[in-house]
Image (cartoon, rainbow, N blue to C red):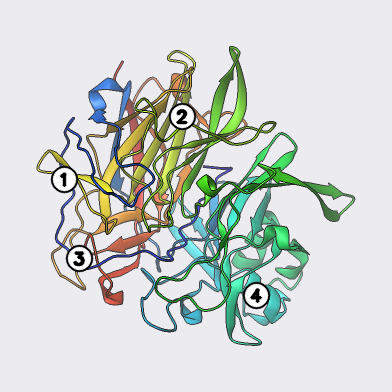
Amino acid sequence: MKALSKTLAFLLVLIVGIGTSSAKTSSVKTSSINSSPNQTDQLSPVLSAAGLPFRVIIEKTNFQLPVGFHSGLVGVYKGLWIFIAGRINGLHGFGISNNFPADAQNTSIYVVNPTTGLVTSRSLKDSSSGLTQQQIDTLTVTSPQGYQEDNTLFMSGGYGVDTATGTFGTKPVLTAIYLPGIVEWVTQPGNKHYSVANNIRQIYNPVFQIAGGEMFKLGNITQLVFGQNFDGDYTDGSNGNYSDQVRQFQIKRDDGQFSVAIYNAKPNNPDPSFRRRDLNVVPALLNNNNHLQYGLVAYAGVFTTSSGVWTVPVVINDTSDPMMADPNSPTTFKQAMNQYVCATASLYSRKYMSMYHIFFGGISYGFFSNSVFQTDSEIPFINQVTTVQMDKNGNFTQYLMDSQYPVIPSTGSNPGNPLLFGAGAYFIANNILQYPNTVISLDNIRKPTVIGYIVGGIQSTLPNTNVNSDSSASPYVFKVTLVPTR
C-alpha cells in the first residue's frame, strides 16, 4: 500500500442481493464463466499456496477500536496510527435517497497506540480545530486517495456532503496534513497552541476531484490512478464520471508554501479499459532490462459497463502510458478473486525476482466453497486471502492462501454467522525493512514475523445483502504474521 495509508472502498453501484454462498477451504480447481458481464469470460487458475515461499497467519489482537471505520486514510507517526475521513457505518444503502448519510461520515480524528491499545479521538467539529465547515466537509469524505511522505499525509478528493447546501459530490481539493501537529491536537486537548487548521494546507483544482481511485508518488510525480467524479446523491444504478486515466502532478513545498504543477494525464486520451474504481492499486518493483524501477499495479476493480468486474491488471510506471495485456489472449492473466478494494500487503524478493501482492478478504467475484471454486455475479463478501505473484518477466500467477480471517460470530444481525472482513480495510505495515516505496523486503524475513496489522473495514454478516443492518464498520484489529516456508 502506499506509505502506510489505506484506502478506501467507495461502495457505489454494488449490485447485491441476499444469498447463502460460503467462502471456505482451499483448492487448486478453477472454472470457466459463460456470458459474464466481466471484462473477460475466463479466469486464470487459482493455485495452491504450496507454490509460494511463505504463508500467512491472521489473528485477532487483544484490543479493538471504540468504533469501526472504513474507506478513509491512515498515517503513521512515531508508531502511532492516525485515522482520518471515511465512514463509521457499513455497506451503503440502495434506496432512492440518503444512501450515504452525512451523519455516518467519520468526523473525528483517531490516534491509536498499537503497543498499549490506547485510542484517543477528537471531533473536527470541536471549535479548537480552527476549521471552517467547508474544510470539515473536505476532511470527512468517503474514499479519498492518499499517501504519506515523511510526516505529511496527502489526501485528494473523496465523496461527501456540502453542509451549506445539503448536496453531495466529489471534492476538488488536495490537502497536506502535517501529522505531528495533528497528533498533538488530538492527544493534548488542553493545549491551545495546536489546531487542525494550522497543520493543513489545501489547494482546489478539478484535477483532484476523484473518489475511489488511488494516489502514489513515483519519482517526483504524484499519480492519481483511475476513480470517478460522482456528483449528487447516490441512487441505485447511477454512475459518476470515470477519469479513465492516471492524472499526474508534482507537489511542491518551499518555505512553507504549498503548490502543485499539473502535467498531462496518461494516456493522453481516456481509455475505456481504465473505467475502474474501488480497486487495489499497489506499489511494485518492476524489472526493466534487469534493473528494478518503482511502479504500480492496478488490480481488477469495478464496474464494467455491464456492471461486472475488471480482471486484467494494469502496470504503471513513471514514464510511459499504463500497460494492460490483451484481454482476448488465452495467455493473459485474469484475476479470479478479491477484485474490490481491501487490505493489501506488498512484498518483493530478489532471490525469486518476484513481487507478491497479498489481498486480505473483501468483496470478490470468485471464492472457494467445499474446496471447489465458484463465482457469484452479486460479488459477495469473503474472508479468503489470495496472493498474486508477478515474476521478473511480468507474468502473473494467483494463489489461495491456507489462512483466512479468524471466525468471529455475529452478535447482532444474523447472530452466529461468521463476520466477513476486509472491504475498505487498512493494512498498516509493522516496523520492518521496506523499500522506499513501502514494499516489504521478503528476503529479510527469515523466521515468523509480524509484517503488519489489518484495521477497520466493513464487516458483513452475509456474503450478499442489501439490508443496512446486515453490515457495519469493523472495530477489530488483526495481526498478520508471515512464515517463510523455504
Earlier sequence position, callout 3 versus callout 1: 1
Q: Amino acid at mark 1?
A: Lys
Q: Amino acid at mark 2?
A: Leu
Which mark is drawn over residue 410? 3
Q: Residue 418 at x, y = what percent?
A: 18, 58
Which mark is drawn over residue 24? 1
Q: Amino acid at mark 3?
A: Ser
Residue 471 picture quarter = bottom left
Q: Amino acid at mark 4?
A: Ile
Earlier sequence position, callout 4 versus callout 3: 4
Quote the CA–CA distance across marks 4 and 3. 34 Å
Outermost residue, right direction? 255
Asked if marks 4 and 2 touch (Cβ < 8 Å), the reply is no
Earlier sequence position, callout 4 versus callout 1: 1
* Residue shown at 33% from the left, 20% from the top: 53
Q: Residue 299 at x, y = what percent?
A: 45, 41
Q: Quadrant of the C terminus?
A: top left
Quote the CA–CA distance across marks 2 and 3. 33 Å
Q: Is residue 30 left or right of residue 297?
A: left
Query: Above or below — where is 218 with respect to 264?
Result: above
- Which mark's residue is nearer the viewer, 1 or 2? 1
Which mark is drawn over residue 136? 4
Q: Which residue is mark 2?
A: 347
Q: As rendered, which of 91 and 43 lies closer to the eye?
A: 43
Q: Is residue 470 left or right of residue 428?
A: left
